[in-house]
Amino acid sequence: MQFDLTDLRLYVCVAEMCNLTRAAAKHNMSLAAASTRIKALEMQAGVLLLAREARGVRLLPAGEAFVHHARLMLQQADLLHAEMGEYGGGLRGHLRLLANTTAVTDFLPEILADFLSDHPHVNVELEERPNAMIPRGVLEGRADLGIIAGSIDTLGLVSIHFSTDRLVLVTSPSHRFARRRSVNFAETLEEDVVGMPEGSTLQAFLDQITQQLGHRQKLRIRLRSFEAMCRMISSNVGIGVLPESAVIRNQLAMPLAMVELRDEWSVRERHLLMRDRATLPVYAQALVDNLCRHYDAGRLLSASPPQMLAASG
């Protein structure tokens, strides 16, 4: 059987969205054209792949198997395209990266800016996802690389530990907690809080911890960037829980007090996930090297998944 790569990309998109109309729109084709392509795929495969339902489509067992192999074929095609690009005068490719809130908001912009400057023919598709969803996305081929924090099940993926960070309590210098060397998170629950928007993996993690303690955070304002949060905290609008690295960077520009959290979950090991480094496109391997060099993490790989514990954002 010979399959058209455009048809395979469309089918994978349909499988991920469970909706033919939205997949057609994403690929800039009419619904009729997309439907014709999917039917042609089913004829080539000799079996029905999708069940059409009122609210979308559902993968049939054969469709589940087909999407797995379609992703593998597309990955190999992308790898071939990238490696041939080396001989054509530069790396050309598309890199898909899943990462948690801290990575997207805090340290990745600087690293990706340098990487994209060095690789002008590479595009990066960066998506924020909860930590627990990232390994599955990489394993199923929806991303080339994933960045997680905290100890969660990596599903046997190749894992590079590239840095350790911790969550800390941040206050204005005049706040009563500013005089403390350390606190338990439970002690802070009656305070006004500067937080992040709903959908942020870090905020969702803190909400979960708060609920486990039988409380709800007293959120005064939600902000999308760590810098904006620090400015509010510095003005004594409320307290916040942020990555230590983000606080240290913002302390250069504004008065902030940083207090250690005694809770075990505050220490966060960061890992970079991939299916197999040897089969990564050359430009993806270059990003792995850039990230490791940035943190002086070396190149030791571990395929052993860490123990399954809490995952922070």
Image (cartoon, grey):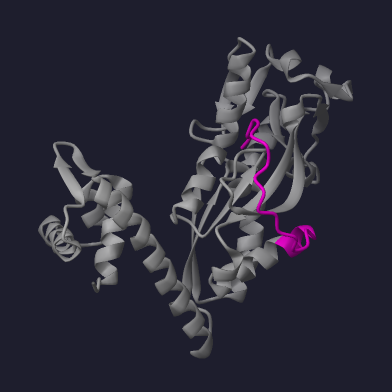
Q: Main secondary structure of the magenta part?
A: loop
Tell me where residue 56 sits by quadrant. top left
Question: How many numbered markers are drawn?
Answer: 0
Question: Who is closer to the viewer here, 147 or 202?
Answer: 147
Q: Quadrant of the N terminus?
A: bottom left
The residue at 26%/51% (across/down) is 63
The residue at 78%/27% (across/down) is 172
Task: Please tell me whether residue 106 is drawn above or below residue 168 in the rendered image.
Answer: below
Task: Please tell me whether residue 296 is drawn above or below residue 136 in the rendered image.
Answer: below
Tell me where residue 191 sits by quadrant. top right
Q: Is residue 306 magenta?
A: yes
Q: Is residue 39 magenta?
A: no
x%, y% of residue 54?
A: 14, 36
Q: Is residue 251 visible?
A: yes
The residue at 43%/67% (across/down) is 75
x%, y% of residue 11?
A: 26, 57
The magenta span reads: 292-313
Tell me where residue 120 sits by quadrant. bottom right
Q: Is residue 19 left or right of residue 312?
A: left
x%, y% of residue 301?
A: 71, 59
x%, y% of residue 153?
A: 60, 40
Q: Is residue 223 left or right of residue 237?
A: left
The residue at 44%/78% (across/down) is 81
Task: Please tell me whether residue 254 is drawn above or below residue 3 in the rendered image.
Answer: above
Q: Is residue 89 visible?
A: no
Q: Quadrant of the C terminus?
A: top right
Q: Is residue 177 left or right of residue 53?
A: right
Question: Who is closer to the viewer here, 38 or 257?
Answer: 38
